[in-house]
Image (cartoon, helix red, strand yellow):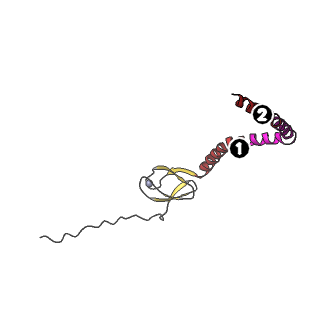
Amino acid sequence: MNNQFSRLYTSNDSGIGCLLTLVLGGLLLGSVGWGWVVNGFFILGAIILLLPLVAWLGLRWWLSRNLVQSLCPVCSYEFTGFNRTECQCPNCGESLKVEGGTFQTLTPPGTIDVEAVEIPYQGLED
Ligand SMILES: [Zn+2]
């Protein structure tokens, strides 16, 4: 008990000098650059808070510029695609390119897609 008290006392004794250093350091910081540090923290906090909002707005702007909702020229199925890309109609599977806000077929007009079906040879029974 006595040992503990004396240790507390000595730590208090040396704590005064430490406290004085802290106060002097705080005053020095306050006179030199504390305001800048506080402002820096506020600016950093604002950036951290605003960054997702700005990113979300930027993404919305980018999507509004690049997302195209139109009809498939083959089957008139309405779907969305990205501008200046090639995609496939989810309904009929036609390869399309997105240009000028509409879907256009990759194959030249007048081309008829023919699917070849292989029929197994059964031979002549009769
Ligand atoms: Zn289609």
> What residue sits 74% from the left and 33% below the top?
7
> What residue sits 86% from the left and 40% below the top?
28
Residue 51 x/y as whole percent = 67, 45
Left or right: where 9 falls relative to 84: right
Give the overall secondary structure of the magenta segment. helix
> What residue sits 22% from the left and 70% below the top?
121
Q: Which residue is mark 1?
A: 47
Q: Which residues are magenta?
A: 19-43
Q: Secondary structure at mark 2?
A: helix
Q: Nearer the viewer, residue 114 or 24?
A: 24
* Ligand 1 occupies quarter: bottom left
Q: Amino acid at mark 2?
A: Thr
- Tell me the mark number nearer the camera, choosing from 2 and 1: 2
How dense is the environment of label 1, judged by Cα within 10 Å: few (below 14), some, or many (20 and up)? few
Q: Is residue 44 above or below residue 94?
A: above
> What residue sits 49% from the left and 58% below the top?
87
What is the distance, in whole Å, between disc 2 and disc 1 at their CAs? 46 Å
Residue 126 x/y as whole percent = 11, 70
Q: Secondary structure at mark 1?
A: helix
Respond yes or no on whether mark 2 lies under 8 Å from ligand 1. no
How dense is the environment of label 2, judged by Cα within 10 Å: few (below 14), some, or many (20 and up)? few
Left or right: where 118 falls relative to 112: left
Q: Nearer the viewer, residue 33 or 66?
A: 33
Residue 63 x/y as whole percent = 59, 49
Q: Amino acid at mark 1?
A: Ile
Outermost residue to the front: 2
Where on the picture, by quarter, is residue 125?
bottom left
Q: Is residue 98 magenta?
A: no
